[in-house]
Amino acid sequence: MQRLSIRKLLNNKAAAYVIAGSFLILSILLGISIGAVSVPIFTIIQIIISKLFGFSFDQIDPMFSSIVLNIRLPRVILAGLVGASLAIAGAAFQGLLRNPLADPYTLGVSSGASVGAVVTLFFNLSIPIIGSFTLPLLSILFSWVTIFLVLTFARKIERSMRVETIILTGIIFSSFLGAIISLMIALTGDELRQIIGWLLGSVSMRGWEYIKIILPFFVLGSVILMFNTKELNAMSFGEERARHLGVNVQKRKLMILTAGSILTGAAVAVSGTIGFVGLVIPHLSRLLWGPDHRHLLPLSIITGSGFLILADLISRTIISPTELPIGVITALIGAPVFALILLQRKRMERSG
Amino acid sequence: MLSVQHVSGGYTDESVIKNISFEVQTGEMFGILGPNGSGKTTLLKMISGILPISEGDIFIKGKRLLEYNTKQLAQIIAVLSQHSSQSFSYTVKETVSLGRYAHQTGWFQTWGENDERIVQRVMKQTGVAAFQNKSIQELSGGEKQRVFLAQALAQEPEILLLDEPTNHLDLSYQKELLDLLKNWTTETGLTVLSIFHDLNLAGLYCDRLLLLENGTININHIPNEVLREERIRDVYHTEIQKHPHPKVAAPQMVLLPKVKQDRKVNHIDESMLCVTKEFIELNSVSPLRTMSSGVIGSGTGWHHTFVNRHVDKDYNCSDHRKEMADFLKVNGFEPSETVGMMTAVILEDVSYKHIKGDGFSVFVVVTAGVGNAIDASKSEQHTFETVPGTINTWIFVNGELTEEAFIQCIMTATEAKAKALHDLNVIDGVTGTIATGTSTDSILIAATQTGEPLEYAGTITPLGKLIGKAVYECTTEGIQKSQKRKKV
């Protein structure tokens, strides 16, 4: 009886958004508050309000103000945007491929984006006119090419594209692309620590500049996906059935894959490869609130950003003053979840 | 409604479907049959627009298939395919609701009252409304199939394409589903195109059948024409026999198993007959194909025990069938495998004869009593009153009989019996004319169905001659014995 009432509460969509939203706000406040210098939460709220609405509170310590506005807030926002991008991209990939194990990382899309980013960074490329957008654009382009290569290859192996086949193909591509990155790094002879730090993913010391880079792509990708939620629902039952239901599968698939690539590419460009966010968050959201993509996508955005803000908080506080790469934290959480999902699926296949 | 014109096509360069044309009318239930790999599913996928058409054209409501966009097509055609993947645990209602996709337009496709009403209706019709909030992953195969049927119906299609809809369904749901579809075709004018593996279901429900063979049309006709023994045997390369449905005018096919049934040399003759005071018994090693009018095991069937039981002259029982079955059980016979008859004749007076023909033989057993002999041509003068005093005739044939041979056996035996009564001058007590039999005569034809095939059993066929002779002689002998006993 109690279980039922809990389920009902969780099923209620409004409640879902309230819970997810509270989680995000709490994460943001904690993320800004905790650090080498602890900022009281009330002060944070005051600072943000004064910045937003032009009020001035006399008693605000300028040091707090500077820490919050120049260091912690951009970091938290960036972590939030990256988390949101990866989570919604993961949710979309999973729905499209009917594969709960798919996410930008396991599909090899992140690696593709990394190659794009590394190429830009280490050859110091800058396309005229678009300037600072060269980095995300090349990352996006490389992710886009990668996802199509992975899917084409997987389809060649097996027409039905089983879950394991796609993941295996993703791993092959990840390894190959990783090797290319290593090769490039070895050839440039730069300092390794910094590069590896970037590869494992980090949102530190990026500042407002990077937020401006990711934000437009995040908005674009998310909007495209939000207009395809019904189609994602239909395609969860297979492309053929989606077509019978009236979905223009070719067009919608292209849109969804492109949006996924935009989100992944932009996220990787600003933060390196952070794995498993796109796997854990949609899975968790689906478990709690059901697989309907009309709600799954926005809820993944909210919980994904909250999750990465918390992961970033842990990564910089757990062995402070040294900072762990954020990818370490997400992998520590994500890999076991991955294993768990795989186990669950196999058990389900056996039982039915 | 649907017109397929000289269509070829398939998965790769080589066409699976070759130059196929047919038309389906509104409200028709149209079945597609064919062995594995004959192109049934390919054809269905081409009609639903999944596979390209390399040659020819498909017209739906007079418009070319290619001129419809995906959404427009989904408003007219719904498909229920064989396999459905469901990777995520959508609820039943969410799944069914997706069927409304094609009818929702605009950027913000809102869920209207109409949509809700339709979804609730189709869920009720398919019997899935009760678990609409359950996850489809928790359902059984048959329940899932019904959920997807509901989804297809939620599209409010004019044409429904089904790929083996009864797959995964148990017997009662197979029937229910097809009854439902059949009703819809007549009531709402829904056109149904369905692939069937089960020829009998197809024959039972479809208005017309299309038989595919290697990607071409073998025949497109009414079920009775399509489901012909020779045709099905050739197309499916299997032994099959046509059989009428007992209640409905629809052809049914039965498979003939290739496994050699352990038919021991089964030869029926006098050595197997066992006569006691209570009953005459004949036990066959393997079951015999029978046609009889016995109290137990009447009609056609397969039986291996045959019992002719003596009952008292005053035997009277309101439920003689049950009484007879109980009697058989008590004596160690299985009623379902037994043909049982009754007679008031003293069983010692049984007469039997084994006559050999060319490659076959006939063994006839008769118990005869003429206590209530009747002239069949004047039987209206008799009041209904059954007195045991019967001619029971058993005819065992060591050979393989056709259905018509069975019937001819009965005719020949009856004629021979009437002649025997005539020659013995047995008189009908009421009319004073020569009798043709008694009022409670029974007959059994049982054939081993091995050895010589015997197509006919008319009076001048080899089999008919033997039967005529044996029945005549046995009946004569039996009647004489019983008359002698009476005199004594």
Image: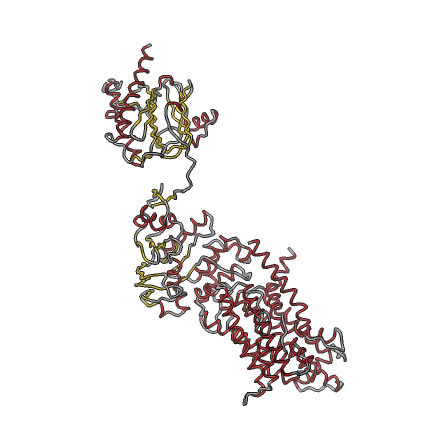
Relative to A306, is A168 on the left or the right?
Answer: left
Above-or-below relation of B121 to B456: below
Query: Residue B428, how many percent across, how many down?
Result: 26, 19
- Image quadrant assignment for residue B410: top left
Relative to B350, is A310 on the left or the right?
Answer: right
Q: A115 or B413: which is nearer to us?
A: A115
The residue shown at (40%, 65%) is: B12
Query: Residue A111, how many percent across, how many down?
Result: 59, 75
Q: B49 or B401: which is nearer to us?
A: B401
Above-or-below relation of B437 to A157: above
Can I make out residue B114 in this image? no
Image quadrant in which the N terminus of chain B is located: bottom left
Image quadrant in which the C terminus of chain B is located: top left
Can I make out residue A233 in this image? yes
Query: Residue A3, how many percent across, how many down?
Result: 64, 57
Above-or-below relation of B459 to A118: above
The residue shown at (48%, 61%) is: B96
